[in-house]
Image: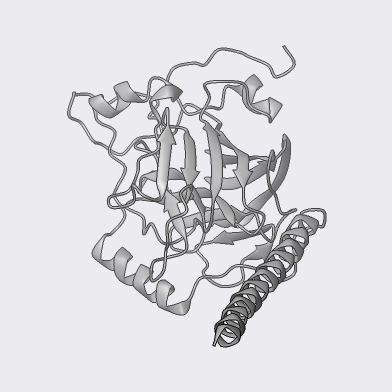
Amino acid sequence: MAGFYVAGALAVVMMFYTCFKCSANNAQREDSSKKRADQAAVAATEAGSLAVPIHNASSEAAARALDYVRNNPPRPLALDAQILKRMASPANWSFVVPPDHDAFVSIEDGTRVTLFGQPISRAGLDTDLAIVPNLPLPLIATEPPATADATATPGPTTRAILYFEVTVVNMDPQTTVAVGLTTAPWPTFRLPGWNAWSVGYHSDDGRCYSSDDGQGVEYSKPYRIDDVIGVGVNTGDWSVFFTRNGVKLATVSSARVPAPRLAVHPAIGANGRASLEVNFGTWPFKWEPANEGQFGLALDVLLRYSVNA
């Protein structure tokens, strides 16, 4: 009888050992697969813009976004006295956590943003998330409104270029980060560039999307940790361009900001963990001409600073 119990105990031990070994092997295979995928994502940034997109949203998400825009049309630009006062300093541009997204977005000092920072299950939820700040681009009239509550359409802006930059502080290798411009309100489950009106430069494939939920166009190199992406609007013809690590990239021929008819906001987004820091003009830009031209987002004249100072 004792031998029977010993044999049974050994069988149970062997069963647990086999299960543990299988679990360990599965974990090793998953780690190895993730490592290969991460290495491929890193290698992609060494090449130019990829010929085909890497990350695209589902057709179901695209259909929901169209419904959202129909039910929540973009806001017109309205520059009353209170908004003009807040636009006096770039420090007043501050990103806002969308309703019901506290678990997925954390913001420090209005410009240091972490998306999907907590290991919370997103099963059944949207995998893409985009946010905008509280203020639109300062499309400044050459003369202020005649009265405190005036909301007249502004005339030509007083700045030749409106500009901001985003530094990728951290991101998972397989995360797609998108930097660009959107109207508001904006469907939070859509990255910049995928809906009208918007434009976005995406990190995974280096492609640029302009109100396009399809293929986008080849644009520049993918980007990742420590890269600095700038967004500029030429107020002479309302065209859009990007910069990458202080180098100006091509004008996006398909993107024209719908100004001054609609309010257009800076926008950032990701489909996985990413930490981003946004500079609206409170410290020197990586793209030196923006420092020389004082192109940050503010009504008041910015200090003439230089990254070489």
- Name the quadrant of the C terminus: top right
In the rendered structure, the answer to whether residue 204 lies left or right of residue 302 reads right
User: x and y percent of residue 153 in the render?
Assistant: 30, 39
In the rendered structure, the answer to whether residue 132 lies left or right of residue 308 reads left
User: x and y percent of residue 42 in the render?
Assistant: 76, 55
Residue at figure coordinates x 77%, y 63% from the top left: 40
Name the one closer to the observer, 41 or 283.
41
Image label count: 0
Q: Is residue 38 visible?
A: yes
Residue at figure coordinates x 67%, y 69% from the top left: 24
User: x and y percent of residue 298 in the render?
Assistant: 44, 24
Residue at figure coordinates x 61%, y 66% from the top left: 216
In the rendered structure, the answer to whether residue 83 lies left or right of residue 38 reads left
Residue 47 lies in quadrant: bottom right
User: x and y percent of residue 88 in the render?
Assistant: 38, 20
309, above or below 242, in the image:
above
Name the one closer to the observer, 301 or 202.
202
In the rendered structure, the answer to whether residue 167 lies left or right of residue 79 reads right
Name the one closer to the observer, 175 or 216.
175
Name the one closer to the observer, 88 or 41.
41
Residue 81 lies in quadrant: top left
Residue at figure coordinates x 82%, y 53% from the top left: 46
